[in-house]
Image: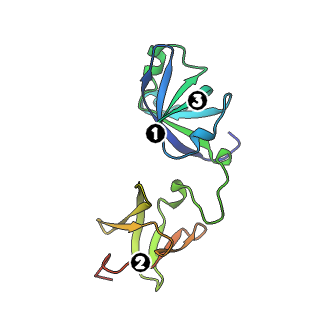
Amino acid sequence: MHGSCLVPVGKITRTHGIRGAVKIYAYGESLGAQAAGSRLYAEGFAFGDQTTVLTIRSLKAQGRLWVAFFEELASVDEAQKVVGAEVFLPEDRLPTLAEDEFYHYQLIGLTVETREGKRIGILRAILETGSNDVYVVDRKGIEILVPALEDVIHEVDLERRRMVIDVPEGLMDDL
């Protein structure tokens, strides 16, 4: 796997038909960039502690889901065994992003602070909405929702594991 970490790109939600196809809920656009012959790595309750390699035979978009045929799955019974599993790609196979763009996995766990250096909390989740993402920041057990907008997010520093924001008026009155 080229020595890079595995990044989740989707979750197998159910079987599709009787020839071993599955439907995958994609976490972003990385899954759709894969072609026949590409390998995904599946992990989940069906596999115990092991990782299973799945080789893409075909992949077709169906709304927000993807219908996937894998070389390793030839029947609905085999496909049923992977339902619920997450699928991963090695980090070095993800499409390259623009300089000011980040994958969600890179942002989760960052310390969020104000421009003045006041610590707000830890970014724990990202909600995808129609217009912009919303960052869920854990502040001592309280969730703070921060809109992922250009005028709010001042800086993302992956090396120092921090995000600097301009707190919108009314977001946090106790700062």
Q: Earlier in the sequence, mark 2 or mark 1?
A: 1
Tell me where residue 22 appears, x and y as whole percent: 48, 25
* Amino acid type shown at disc 2: Arg
Residue of label 1: 64
Disc 3 and disc 1 in contact, CB within 8 angstroms = no
Q: Which residue appears at 47% of the width and 61% of the height?
A: 109
Q: Within 10 Å of the Cα at label 3, are there few (<14), some (14-19), or many (20+) other Cα atoms?
A: many
Tell me where residue 6 appears, x and y as whole percent: 58, 44
Q: Cα distance, mark 3 to mark 1?
A: 13 Å
Residue of label 3: 59
Which numbered circle lies on residue 119? 2
Q: Which residue appears at 46% of the width and 29% of the height?
A: 23
Tell me where residue 171 appears, x and y as whole percent: 32, 75
67 relative position to 142: left or right: right
Q: Cα distance, mark 3 to mark 2?
A: 43 Å
Which circle, 2 or 1, is nearer the viewer? Answer: 1
Q: Cα distance, mark 2 to mark 1?
A: 36 Å
Q: Nearer the viewer, residue 155 or 1?
A: 155
Disc 3 and disc 2 in contact, CB within 8 angstroms = no
Q: Earlier in the sequence, mark 3 or mark 1?
A: 3
